[in-house]
Image (spheres, rainbow, N blue to C red):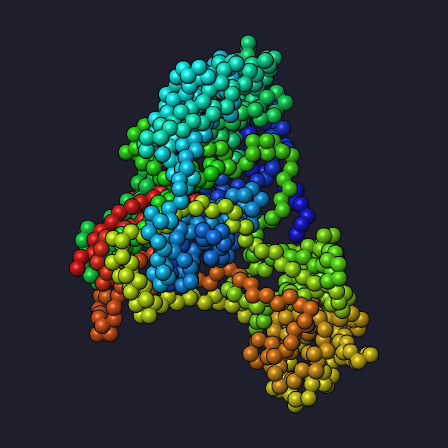
Amino acid sequence: MNKKILYPLCLLSLCCLSTGYAQGQTSAGDLEKQVIEGALNRGSEKIYVHLDRPTYLVGETAWFKISLTDEKLRPSGLSSIAYLEFIGADQRAAIQEKIELKNGKGSGAVPIPADLPSGYYQVRSYTNWMKNFAHSFETSICIINPFQPRDPSPAETREEKTVDVRFFPEGGQALTGLPHKYAFKAQQNDGTGIDFKGRVVDETGKVVARFAPLLHGLGHFIFQPEAAKTYHAEVALENGSTQRFPLEAAANEGYATRLTEQPAQLELTVNLRNRPDRSLYLLLYDAEKSKAFQAHTNNGKAGFTIPKSVLRPGVNVLVLLDESLKPVSERLYFHESTPASVLPKPASTRFKKRSHVTLALESVQTSDTLEASVAVFLSDSLPESAPLSINAYLLLTSELKGYIEGPDDYFDPTQPRLAEARDNLMLTHGWRRYRPEDLLAKNLEAAYLPELEGHLIRGRVFSAGNGAPLANRAVFAAYPTASPMPWVAITDDNGRFLLETGRFYGPRELVVQANYRLDSTARISLENPFLEPGNIRNRTFSLPATANSDLLKRSINMQTQNSYFPYKRTPIQPDSSTFYGRPDYRYYLDDYTRFPTVEEVFREYVPAVNVRIKNGRFYSRIIETGFHKQYFTEDPLILLDGIPVIESDPLFRMDPLKIKRADVINRMYYLGPLAFPGIISCHTYTNDLSGFEIDSKALIVAYKGAMEKREFFNPRYENPSKNSLRRPDFRNLLYWGPSVTIVPGQPAQLDFFTSDQAGRYKIVVQAISPNGTTASGFSQFETMD
């Protein structure tokens, strides 16, 4: 649907703090009132994907758990479908799936196709609603194809790396004559940070500042730019070369901000140049718990004080607005709270092959009940992508723009000067969720609706002659099934339509039609529900020679596993009922003498349906025999195995020996935006149309619904049989549990068996509570020969 939908704000609420927080602060009631009245319902969704392993071979299966939250990290029930993609270095999606979500949770498994080339792949996930804001989850995995020729050695294929150093004045602007904090980001073209020594030099060659990165090429320095002077940075690299980078000239007028941290509060100092004294506002955005502050400048200076008690864990966004409520500066601050965690405790650090393992999961630093996903997998010498924990993503990465190297390093207490490293990250990456000016917008033009109860199919009806959109056209879509549930819609002024599919699972052959009796030139196209791949960070893939043995072993194990322990799909129990419920009349044709055509069967045995031939074409009319007796003068809805039949001639000339039963609704029936004068629903014995030919003008397309479930196989060896002892067990994923409940003070108990594969096994736990508490846990053990 191309119409823009306006949504009122219900999520953003600004609460004014008392004037006692800082001297000179006054009420922010006017801003509060304006924002509450004019703010938007932004849908506030975040999504996190826990994958069972960081590295896969083609032919293996990737198991995953999806968690959808609101901005407060509480489970979100807004969307019922999530999209999951694996995107290769060629910028093409290798895997695309739709995942059903219930109460913000979903899980499943995807087999890795055998024809994928080796390399790093981006895993991306989002909902239909998140498309409006360009938000998505992103992480990388490694896929290895041992059956394709190996690439040349890394030395022959490695792209020449270039270095770029960028500088970011705090708050977005520096003023001449004032000391200012400059952050910097030094990266290679693959996004990895570099170590170096740098200095800032003026046009006379005088060194005015020196700097060096703290973590991943990020750092900062204090420097006072002077008017009428130019500056550049000289960066001495580890290879002995020196590069120069320009430093943006400081402004002579505008706003300069400086954020300082005190034990119990933050202090934001604002300096104005060539601006009259005025009221300024500071917005602390935190969804429905956002806060507003107001202060008046005095001789070009103003100050705000923000108590740490009003900050949320993770990234906090401070937006400075002028008296006309125009955003003039933005500052991010990372607030650390006592992190929760999960402590995985295996019964031992060493186990024999095919031995019983018990694993206790204990929550730490939280009183919330956690829902966790747990993976136990073999860690070998094959390349692995850096992990992305649920803490690092939901509290950090999901809020920041651009690629962030090693996000979990910013949660590592062993990192030196950790708070400073986090602040460098805040200074060099902008806020990704919204533009500051959008926070005060009066309405939201949403091109994509939330999928509240199943996948939404978007499409367009147009004229085959000139491509012009066709408005007010009925659209029908369905797939052959024993339980008819056609989807219907009416096109808007731009010829666009939206079909609500509800419970739609697995790959299907979808038939989409318009009413070709009214307009034989109508044609239909469907939109791709997945996002365009976009620009994927290019990383050079190489496999060290030391990994050859592990690669061969894992390849053999994968083929053995697929032969002896194939994963089974858990079939979705189809809804055996029809959309129209109990029909008014039901005829099983085996109970009657068969005539040569379906038309004769209806003429002789179905009094509620009047079939006539006019000008060589069949016409059917329903006769209502209930309380209101009447003869309908329009065509009823005719279905064959759930597929709407627009042109009924082929159906009525069909061999009735292929028809098992016919249902008749002989009254007005309302389906979505359409009304039908009765329904005729025919069912074949095979529920696959039995050779009936669909109208050539219809769009027939292979289309996937929500992914069907798969069952994780976990063999048991308490009482091994002779067959199980002879059967090889080369599993490298020993356990996968997408939904494990961990109650405070009551450690969850898991058990499984090791395989015949010796080595070091990692235990990874990612968890979240209904209140938005996130927690991760890591451990390991060994399986001995």
| Residue closer to the observer: 209 or 768 | 209
Q: Is residue 48 above or below residue 689?
A: above
| Residue closer to the observer: 231 or 562 | 231
> In x, y percent, where is residue 737?
35, 55
Q: Residue furthest top?
A: 299
Rendering quarter of residue 354:
bottom left
Q: In the drawing, does residue 705 fall left or right of residue 635?
A: left
Residue drawn where x is 59% and y is 60% of the image? 501
Residue drawn where x is 34% and y is 67% of the image? 562
Q: Quadrant of the C terminus?
A: bottom left
| Residue closer to the observer: 670 or 559 | 559
Q: Residue furthest bottom?
A: 593
Residue drawn where x is 22% and y is 69% of the image? 719
Q: In the drawing, does residue 197 fall left or right of residue 330?
A: left
Tally of numbered discs: 0
The answer to whether residue 169 is visible is no
Q: Is residue 436 above or below residue 533?
A: above
Residue drawn where x is 37% and y is 44% of the image? 389
> In x, y percent, where is residue 321?
57, 24
Rendering quarter of residue 179:
top left
> In x, y percent, where is residue 254?
56, 18
> In x, y percent, where is residue 357?
23, 57
Q: In the drawing, does residue 514 fall left or right of residue 749?
A: right
The answer to whether residue 755 is visible is yes
